[in-house]
Image: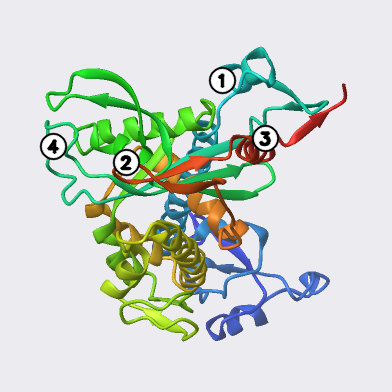
Amino acid sequence: MNRHTNRRYVFSDEIPESTNEKQNEVSESNKSVNKSVFLVPKGNIKKRKKSSHKGSHKHLKRWQKVIIIVLCVLIAIALAAIGTVAVLLNTGKSDMTTKIEDVSLKVPDNIENHENGEYITYKGDRYMYNENLASILFMGVDKRDFETEDDTYGQNGDADALMLLVYDTKTSKSTIVSISRETIADVEAYSTEGKYVGTKKEQICLAYSYGDGKEKSCENEVAAVRRLFYNVPINSYVALDLDGISYMNDAVGGVELTPIETFRNFTEGETVTLWGKDAESYVRYRDTTKLLSNNSRMKRQKQYLNAFFNQLVTSTKADFTTLLDLYNAASPYMMTNVGANKAAYLASEALQNNFSALNMQNVPGEVKMGEKYAEYHIDEDAFFEMFLNIFYVVKLDK
């Protein structure tokens, strides 16, 4: 058998030098064959450079395959994370709002009410409840320790600052209603042993004290504010020990503002950047010897809140970890039922829609000196119109 019989042959565009003699032996009859193609033993051929052939991707090196697999895994993780965030945002929005069929308002007797508040007729016009609204009650309390539960009802601190955030999830419009701590309202009272003793006309701030200093206190305060607002849905709350303000203030990089009054080490009209305890002092200070001192404090709180949100948005856009710093600073001083889904939704909305442009309003009324304490009495007509403009944004044809 010819020794070349079992050899395999390949086509090559270049002929190695070792085959030159064999080329000379090619017969004249083969000269008609295209000289760019030769049959040569495979063993004598040098390795060719990789062709740009379409099938070359099938011969990827091992390290290239590993990189591709790793990239695929990273992409899968990223997509899963994005999907998780999307679920959080969607469920957060759903949990923040209340369907119109679940609304059961108790408006004044002289107001024409339809379907438990679904529709209201006022001064000849007909309005419908806006079911796109999310309401969160923010409470600034003088509770020193959220970790400890106190069963002595009536002695668990007061809600010194009350603000109701109403956010329209459709239009991204936000309104904050500031409620005086001295507002006279229906408050559910309990004995020191926790036994319900009935509803009393008291300062609304006292509703918080009738609880355990934790969830029960927050829920009792929410209930009092709901009754004040004609039983409007409020399904979320955040209670903050006012001692935590200084830490939250520093977490966002300090807050710059111009004091609107002179007290302690603040001078009206002189711009300052608040740090630490100065921030707490600016928000918290109240002269109990002056009847209108709480009104002045509420004005400072509104000013500070606007400045704080401005700084928060600015800092977060520059460094997203600011939100984590703020959470870590606030956590030891905070009690809330806002879960991860609600928090994710609110954070997303705040960054996209600039919560710094807040529409802030006060519950209308006037303060008077009662038998023992200052009492803030609501102007019912003005308050209802404010309520209608916030919660009933759609006017219907008669």
**CA distance for labels 3 and 4:** 38 Å
Mark 4 or 2 closer to N-term? Answer: 4
Near mark 2 (Cα within 10 A), the count class, few <14, some 14-19 or many ≥20, is few
Q: Position of residue 302 (x, y in %)?
A: 49, 61
The quadrant in which residue 125 appears is top right
Near mark 4 (Cα within 10 A), the count class, few <14, some 14-19 or many ≥20, is some
Q: Position of residue 103 (x, y in %)?
A: 57, 21
Is there CB contact under 8 Å for labels 4 and 2? no
Residue on which the image places disc 2: 371
Is there CB contact under 8 Å for labels 2 and 1? no
Secondary element at tag 3: helix
The quadrant in which residue 211 appears is top left
Mark 3 or 4 closer to N-term? Answer: 4
**CA distance for labels 4 and 2:** 32 Å
**CA distance for labels 2 and 1:** 30 Å
Secondary element at tag 1: loop
**CA distance for labels 3 and 1:** 13 Å
Disc 2 marks a residue whose amino acid type is Glu
Residue on which the image places disc 3: 388
Q: Position of residue 354 (x, y in %)?
A: 59, 61
Judged by depth in the image, the label closer to the viewer, 2 or 3, is: 2
Judged by depth in the image, the label closer to the viewer, 3 or 4, is: 3
Secondary element at tag 2: loop
Disc 1 marks a residue whose amino acid type is Lys
| Quadrant where the C terminus is found in the figure | top right
Q: Tell me: 217 left or right of 8.
A: left
Residue on which the image places disc 1: 106
The quadrant in which residue 280 appears is bottom left
Is there CB contact under 8 Å for labels 3 and 1? no
Residue 365 in view here: yes
Residue on which the image places disc 4: 149
